[in-house]
Structure formats: structure tokens, C-alpha cells
Image (cartoon, rainbow, N blue to C red):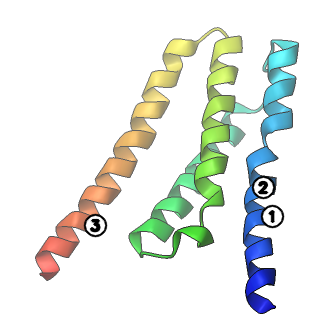
Amino acid sequence: METALLSFCNWSTLGVCAALKLPQISAVLAARSARGISLPSLLLELAGFLVFLRYQHYYGYPLLTYLEYPILIAQDIILLLCVFHFNGNVKQAAPYMAVFLSSWFILTLQKWIIDLAMS
């Protein structure tokens, strides 16, 4: 009984997270405008999701305990690209993506170095 309830909670959380940003993305696409979306707020949310995801992954937590974060990150990245597209500055998206990807790479590299030093 407890296992079934836990499984239901896990999958319902994933389902809700999969649809969490879709109304916002569809509204931006329908309006063909990113007016009303705060870029700093979106970037802060994305950074928070990335840090939390990296923390969970770094310490080896089970994937089901943090699987909603990759889903939310993907939706935030799509929304971020829509914001840049409709604001007319798509070229500005590259530095943001480079910073996020390089920070992810550096944190991963740091774990590998620590793991090698410990062995």
C-alpha cells in the first residue's frame, strides 16, 4: 500500500511538472510577444533549478527524487528562448546558454577530480 502511494505521488509530481510551464509557453507563442515575462526572474528560476539538480546528482540521490527538475529546466530553456526570440535578441541567448553549460561542466569536472583524488 505504501509503495503504491509513493509511486503515485512520484508520477503525479512528474506529470504536474511536465505541464507546469506549458500554459505560459503557449501564451507567449500565441501572443507572439514576451511582454510581461521578467527575464531576470526567469534566469534566477533556471539557475536555482540547475543548482538543485546538480546538488542532487553530485551526491548521488536516486533519480526519481529529482527527476522533475530536468523537466522544469527544459521548459524554462524553451521559455527563455521564446523570450529572446520575441524580444528580437536571439544572439543574446548564446552567452546565457554558455554560462549554464560551462557551470554544469565545471561542477561535473570538480566531482571527477575529487573522486580521483579520493581513490
Label 2 element class:
helix
Q: How many marks?
A: 3
Which badge, 1 or 3, comes first in the chain's sequence?
1
Q: Which mark is residue 70?
A: none
Image height check: is 86 above or below 116?
above
Q: Residues within 10 Å of mark 1 (few under 14, many from 20)?
A: few
Q: Indicate the quadrant containing the N terminus: top left, top right, bottom left or bottom right.
A: bottom right
Image height check: is 93 above or below 105?
above
Q: Amino acid at mark 2?
A: Gly
Circles 2 and 1: CB atoms closer than 8 Å: yes
- Dividing the picture into quadrants, the one containing residue 110 is bottom left
- Dividing the picture into quadrants, the one containing residue 116 is bottom left
- Dividing the picture into quadrants, the one containing residue 60 is bottom left
C-alpha separation, residue under disc 1 versus residue under disc 3 = 32 Å
For the question of whether residue 14 can be seen, the reply is yes
- Closest to the observer, 70 or 64: 64
| Residue designated by label 1 | 12
Residue 30 at x, y percent in the picture: 86, 16
| Residue designated by label 2 | 15
Q: Which mark is residue 111?
A: 3
Residue 8 at x, y percent in the picture: 80, 73
Q: Residues within 10 Å of mark 3 (few under 14, many from 20)?
A: some
Image height check: is 56 above or below 22?
below
